[in-house]
Amino acid sequence: MLIKICGLTKVTEADYLNANHVDFAGFVLFFPKSKRNITIEQAKEIMQALDPSIKKTAVVVKPSIKQIRQIEAAGFDYIQIHGMIDPALFSQIRLPVLKAFNVKDMDTIADYRLDKNVAGYVFDAHEPGSGKSFDWSMLSDIPRDNKLFFLAGGISADNVKEAIKKLSPDGIDVSTGVEYNASNKTGKDPQKIEEFVRIIRTEQKTYNRFSFYK
Ligand SMILES: O=C(O)c1ccccc1N[C@@H]1O[C@H](COP(=O)(O)O)[C@@H](O)[C@H]1O
């Protein structure tokens, strides 16, 4: 099971990801509406502190070609794209894409299935980064293919086990669920990250043991 922690804003948060050997780190860029929005320069600083095995993902909403080129030049491994983007622009992207769907646009997945540059899909709630979930039954009719299937949107230590059991995603994507919710602290909470990762890894071990007997 791949683990993706999104919305890093501080260099110290890289340590929490390194310590827990997660697989992907996400950085919200060019989206001032988000409290997690950072500049490419800030993202670069955090990326330098990340273990090289962790895949660095630029998270954007309807990016322009200028923004895409800046992201490509900054050393990201993946670009996660929310919202509709012109196919002519999409075909010019030189990084592997994680195409995000936010409930209303889930039926557009058909447009990306044959695109070799699309490495995976992120199924997210209506409002990205809101910490709200959505009706997972929407995903049961979506045929799986050879691309990565990430589940996002309101995942936390409270529901991640159930999410894995119900949907068997390739990866779990979390932001709000591993953040402080106290008024005097912001950003990622190392204890929540540790607990979240532990639950996923334990669930995975149980699943692997069970599969052996199937
Ligand atoms: O986190 C944001 O503010 C954000 C802004 C714009 C696009 C995507 C954003 N976050 C993505 O939302 C999911 C996680 O959501 P949650 O907070 O766990 O409910 C993840 O894919 C983030 O990259």
Image (cartoon, helix red, strand yellow):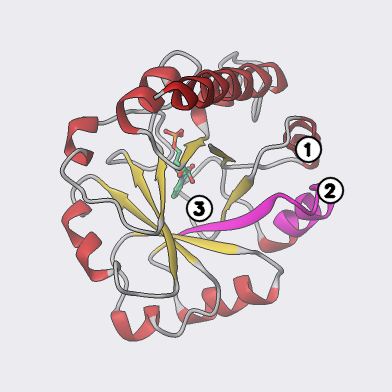
Q: Position of residue 145 (x, y in %)?
A: 32, 57
Which amino acid type is shown beneath numbered disc 2?
Ala
Q: How far is disc 3 from disc 2 in space, using C-alphas? A: 24 Å
Q: Position of residue 90 (x, y in %)?
A: 38, 78
Q: How far is disc 1 from disc 3 in space, using C-alphas? A: 27 Å
Quadrant location of the C terminus? top left
In-front residue for pair 91/27: 91
Whether residue 188 sits left or right of residue 162 in the image: it is right
Label 3 CB less than 8 angstroms from ligand 1: no
Q: Which mark is residue 49?
A: 2
N-term-proximal mark, 1 vs 2: 1
Q: Position of residue 100 (x, y in %)?
A: 37, 54
- Tell us which disc is closer to us: 1 or 3: 1
In-front residue for pair 146/181: 146
Which amino acid type is shown beneath numbered disc 1?
Asn
Residue drawn at (60%, 24%) of the image: 201
Q: Which residue is mark 3?
A: 32
N-term-proximal mark, 3 vs 2: 3
Q: Which residues are magenta?
A: 42-60
Which amino acid type is shown beneath numbered disc 3?
Pro
- Mark 1, secondary structure of its residue: helix
- Tell us which disc is closer to us: 3 or 2: 2
Q: How far is disc 1 from disc 2 in space, using C-alphas? A: 9 Å
Q: Is residue 72 above or below residue 29?
A: below
Q: Which residue is mark 1?
A: 18
User: What crowding class fits label 3: few (fewer than 14 Cα within 10 Å), some (14-19), or many (20 or more)?
Assistant: few
Cβ atoms under marks 1 and 2 closer than 8 Å: yes
